[in-house]
Amino acid sequence: MQPLEFSHYSDPLDLLRRFIPTPMKATYRLDGARLGVETNDCALLPELPLDADITATCALEWKLIRDADSPGLLEPPMFLTSATLTVVAMGTACLLALDHETRKLFAFIGTDIDALAFREYLVPFLCRMTKDALSGDPIGCFVSWNYDSAHV
Amino acid sequence: MEIIVDRRLEAAVERPAYFRGNGHLVFGFLPPGSFISYDLRRKYVRAVLSTKAARDDSFWRSLLIPITIGILGTTVGVVPLHCACLEQNGNGLLISGDSGVGKSTLTAALTQRGFALISDDWTYFSKEQSTLVAHGLLSPIKLLPDAVQFFRELGELTPTIFLNGELAYEVDPARFAGSTAKNTSRPSRIFFLERTPHPGCHFVPCPSASIRDFFEKSAERLPDELIDAKTLRTGLIGTLSALPSWVLRSGESPQRTSEAIDHFILENEYATA
């Protein structure tokens, strides 16, 4: 396997890392819904049941970006939620946002987040957010501003 | 813009400013202890600030407001571009150039010659009835420690660590040079600063395409879903690049370079008159 490479753009500037390519794509089933996942690191493809129907549209899409410049481990999550948007910060190790209207979730995940932390903590967390969004309950168990508890 | 102040953030891990984005969403941390999200499509900002940040005037003046305008501005008709802006006799003057070329020291020297300061590092442009207007935030000038060789008075100040981790002096132009600061100006010329090892200051007319390329490349790349913002910025850069522009090749000190600019403008205005 090729070593992981990260693309950064400085001409024009991409300080926010909006344009990191995410060429690895897969589709999954999550509680009967079709979930699309794209990433720049195959280690971030979740261990969920795959969906072979490539013609169907996805109910929700994840874009998981391995961020080479985001050191550190996961911290207790901070939530900023509204009817249209849920933003969660777990330190610089993981920043994620879910737009409930476009049904797109994206996350920047630092290089110190290993396979175990991703599988045991982040994937269940993302699945929970996804189920809440698909159930039409965008805030769900998450309070609008919560620093103390993870509610995973 | 919705801002929540939460004293629990006093205990949050201290970290440098850190922003990430995707499409129309941008979010990140801003010290001390604050977390902000920007929704550029819905033009909505939500922030949770520590009480320390909320009470700190310089946090608002030097971080939250400039960063918010920098990120959100292009979606609301204000385009941030990397250049300084000064004004003399009602005429706006933009100083641009690559990082580290000496824009801030030249700006400081120009304020010492009586030019009013609009902005040092970032200038915010809008169009008012098809006229280009440059806006500043009355922010101080940031000078790196080696600027002491040109401005001995800096020795009386203490440098501070800035958002990008740089150690620098924060200089109030009013105290530093007795110069005035203004909110807005109408730019009428651009000088693109280049350093040269050769003595003297040389003004070479600069083609508008070069100015346009420079500002396009030095601006943050915008995603396709912000097409209106991209169009606005491209149009505004086009207007900007039509201004009379010169490459200023200087091998002189900031003071000598500012003197050369002053004389060049006078000669130019005399020739035009």
Image (cartoon, coloured by chain):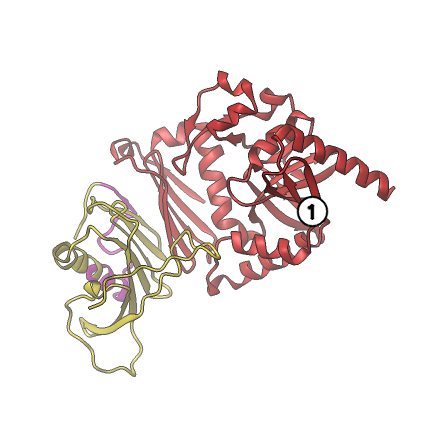
Return the x and y of residue B214 as percentages of the image width and height: 58, 53
Quadrant of the rendered structure where residue A55 is?
A: bottom left
Q: Magenta stretch: residue A8 in it?
A: no
Q: Is residue A30 left or right of residue A105?
A: left
Q: Residue at x 52, y 20 (%)?
A: B154
Any part of residue A34 in sight: no
Q: Quadrant of the C terminus of chain B?
A: top right
Q: Residue furthest front?
A: B198
User: Relative to residue B53, is residue A137 drawn left or right?
Assistant: left
- Residue found farthest to the top: B156
Element type at marker 1?
strand
Picture residue at 65% right of the left edge, 58% below the top: B209
Q: Which chain is yellow?
A: A
Residues shaded magenta: A127-147
Count all numbered tags in the image, as a single digit.
1
| Picture layout, residue A48 above or below residue A83 | below
**Is A75 or B201 nearer to us in this picture?**
B201
The hue of chain B in the figure is red
Instruction: Give residue B73's position: percent from left, percent from top.
Output: 53, 49
Residue type highlighted by circle 1: Trp
Q: Chain of mark 1?
A: B
Q: Relative to the observer, which residue lies in front, A141 or B117? A: B117
Left or right: B89, with A141 as reference point: right
Q: Nearer the viewer, residue A48 or B146?
A: B146
Q: Which residue is mark 1?
A: B246
The answer to which of B202 and B68 lies nearer the viewer is B202
